[in-house]
Every structure is written in structure tokens, then in C-alpha cells.
Amino acid sequence: MRTGAVLFIALLILTTIPIHTSADDPMPTNDLVVDERWIDIVQEGDRKTLDVIEYIFFNNTGTDTFNGTIFSWLPDNAIVRSKCCGNAPDMACRMDAGGVMLCFDMLPTGTDNIVHGQPFEPDTFMSYFGQEATIVIEGTAQNSSYSDSLFLNVTVGQTQTFGDFPVVTGDGLHLTDNAEQLGVVATIPVDASGMAERLGLIQSINITNNSPFNDTVDFEITGLPEGWTAILIENGVVNETSIGSNESKEMILHMQVPTYKIEIQLGYAIPIDGADDPSADYLYQKELIYPNGFIEIFAFILEDDKMTVGDNLDILFSQWSDQKQREWYAMTGVDLSPNDTISFTLGWKNEFAYALMALIITLVVIGSLIGYMFYRKKFAREEKETPEGAEDTEEVAEPPSELEQKKQTMLLAIQRLKTDFEEGKIPEDVYENLLEKYKKSAVDVMKEIDGKG
């Protein structure tokens, strides 16, 4: 009996302990979408790293409060280090309404390739696109007991549906509007900072005094979510108005809703294995967690490396960027769903083939010069052996010494190397390596010539 009681208590205790899954935080359940995602990718000069910055504009199309957590899928071996946070590890940032970047932790979850962060406090009411709210305008007459309240249903992003002011009867104060449902349009311009501008709503409100008294009416607006503002205008902003007996007047409600787009900046570096192998390509891919309305990728790739995009992206153009000194690829994707993948394949330039080509060109030049020198020596010897009395009496110049020939050969090789580099035939690292060797050889030869002089 005692054993059974102990087991029952133990079972009761176990059922009250929260069970944690392998992930530190659950995958997203709130109704978030990504309206726009801009991705900048720069290939480093050593071909061993891709530096990536993602600009993500989140949007909440649901009516629930935002739980504060966002998720992102990163390529294999990616290291989170956002420039907006001074390249501090495992951090990203968001832009607040004033354009200031605020940093937050962006840490791995228990699921491969997925990181998460909390740019906002849990249960934040974000005033995103799609949010619903009920705004109350209450009018109270100062000189009588009459009052009335107007309830306005607002859905951010829903187009306004206008009607007529309803006919009001009965003594007292009456507030009406000419819309069945208030709303704000979904087309939002983006300002210079990349943030969507604030949403504005202008709505007519009718005030009718059907009482036998001239009166002054006080107004109070309640029910505004955090960050929203609303004012009544009658030849300027007013909190009260005078209205005669059996008269009506029209006022304008101005409502401001914060931007529905929230910008997150996430930066990461991708170390690339196998970049030295000219036969191996690198596949950049990213799985999407949220619906994405529009994705734009600017990839800056070293000259002569090749780019092939996946099925969900289209190349807009590719051209040389003087600013980045790289080939600039612009790619876009539209209306992508969760679990869709965006990708491109990067084909390496064969550094070894270029180095070998440069070496072959140099050897050919040197060989040609040496052959030419032997030819000149032979020609000079034949002229010297011409019999006396021959018509050709031109004085034969003494051929240069072997060291002089070697010096001239090295100087010509250096000049040819510079020309090939300026024409883009030789990579910079190969050029600098060969140039240093050639210069050293030329200096050694000149020192030897000076010593024998």
C-alpha cells in the first residue's frame, strides 16, 4: 500500500515537470511572413570564404500578439557575425522606428542549420499588417447627461468600405461614421532607410445633437494598441467641440499606425572546404522557414568563377562591378513557400591552370629570347668569317656576354609578366609570386655583371 502511494506521488510529480524537446525553442507557430529578403554575398579574395548579409523584413499577418522569436536556416558551417553588431559572434540586429540598430542573440537551436533569436519581448503587440483592433470614440456632453460611444473596427491592410451616415433619431448625442469597416491600404512605400513608412488613416466622423440644448462635447479615444495614435480634427486638433441643438457637424479622424515591416539584419561567414580543388564546385543553399514574398540576391564573385542558379531563382543580370572588383550577379525569387530552397552553384576558376599557363608563357618567351641570341651569335660569326674583299664591309658588333643576355632575358620576362597581369591573364597572387622571383634573379645577374666589370 505504501509502495503504491509512493509511485502515485512520483507519477504526479513527473507529470508536472515540463518536457523539453531537442530544440531550445519551438519552431515558429505565430503567423509571420517575410515580405522582402535582400541577401548580399561577397566572395573573399582567397576563395575560401563567403561573407553574407541578409536584410529580412518581417510582417505579422495574424491577429495574435507576436511571441518575440524569429528563426533562420543557415548553410552548413556558417558562422553568425553581423557587421551591425561589430562582428560579435552569434548576434544579429533589428532596426527600430528611429533607424537605430539594436543587437540581440542569434543562437543555434537543437535542429541542424537553424538559429533563432528574440528581437522583441514575448507577447509584444507589434501593429503588423493584418492586425485587428477596436477603437472607441466616446463623446460626453458637458451641459447635459447625454453621451454616446462610436466603436470603429480597424484591420491594418483592409481597404475601407464606405457607406452613408446613418439616420439618427431620438433625443441626445449621436456619433456615427460612414464606413462599415475601417482599414488602411496595404501598399506601403519604403523610405530611404529601407523601413516602410507609417500607415495613415483618414476617416469622416459625424456628431449629431438631437437634444433641446446647445452643448459642448468632450471626446476621448480609447482602445489604441501600443504605438498607435489618433486625433480628431476640426479646423485643427480638438478634444472638444461646441454643437447647437438639433445640429450636426463633421469631424475628421486621423489615425497613425506604426510600420508593419520590421527589418532584421543577419550576417554570417561561410568557410568553404575544397576551394583549392578546381574540379569541385560549391553549392550555396538556404531553406526557407517562412513564406517569402520577394527575395533579391546580389552576389559578388571573383572574376572567371562561374555561377549557376537553382530552380527558385532567376538571374536578372550579371556585370562587372568596379566598386567591388568582382562579377556582380543579381538574382530574384518570388512567392516562395516554407521549405522551399534557394540555391546557386559556384564553379571555381582553376588557379593551378592559370599558374601553369603563366609559367608556360614565360618559358616560351625566355626560350624565344635565348634562341634569338644564339641566332645573333651565329650570324655575327658568319659575318666575321667573310673573306677579304667581299662587298659587305659593315663592322660586326661584338656579341653581348652570356650574363648580359641573361639580364636582358629576365628584364623582358618581367615586362611580359606585367603586361599579362594588366590584361587580366594572370591572377594577382600568381603575378606577385613570379614578379618577386624574376626581380631577384635579375638583381643577382646585375650584381654578377658589376663584379666582373
Image: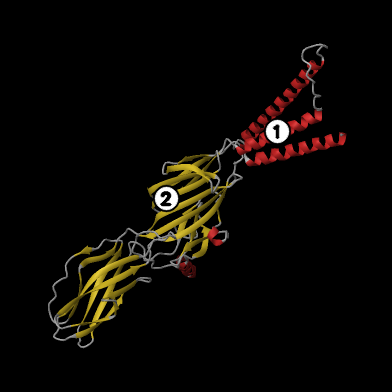
For disc 1, the marked residue is: 413
Tell me the quarter of the picture where residue 215 sits: bottom left
Residue at 70% across, 25% down: 368
Label 2 near label 1: C-beta < 8 Å?
no
Residue shown at 83% from the left, 34% from the top:
449
Q: Residues within 10 Å of mark 2 (few under 14, many from 20)?
A: many
Q: Nearer the viewer, residue 22 or 392?
A: 392
Residue at disc 1, secondary structure: helix
Residue 76 placement (x, y as % from top left): 53, 48
Q: x%, y% of residue 164?
A: 16, 67
Instruction: Please tell me whether mark 1 or mark 2 is closer to you in this view.
Output: 1
Q: Which mark is residue 295?
A: 2
Q: At which x and y percent is residue 259?
A: 38, 64
* Quadrant of the drawing holding the C terminus: top right
* Element type at mark 2: strand
* Residue 416 horizontal side relative to residue 14, left or right: right
Q: Position of residue 60 (x, y in %)?
A: 37, 61
Q: Earlier in the sequence, mark 1 or mark 2?
A: 2
Distance between mark 1 and mark 2 Cα atoms: 49 Å
Quick one: 341 or 242, which is closer to the camera?
242
Q: Nearer the viewer, residue 421 or 226?
A: 421
Please tell me in which quadrant of the rendered image residue 420 appears: top right
What is the residue that sits farthest to the right in this orientation? 452
In the rendered image of this protein, does residue 142 appear above or below residue 403?
below
Horizontal side, residue 271 vs residue 61: left or right: right
**From where the camera sits, is residue 223 visible?**
no
Q: Quadrant of residue 370?
A: top right
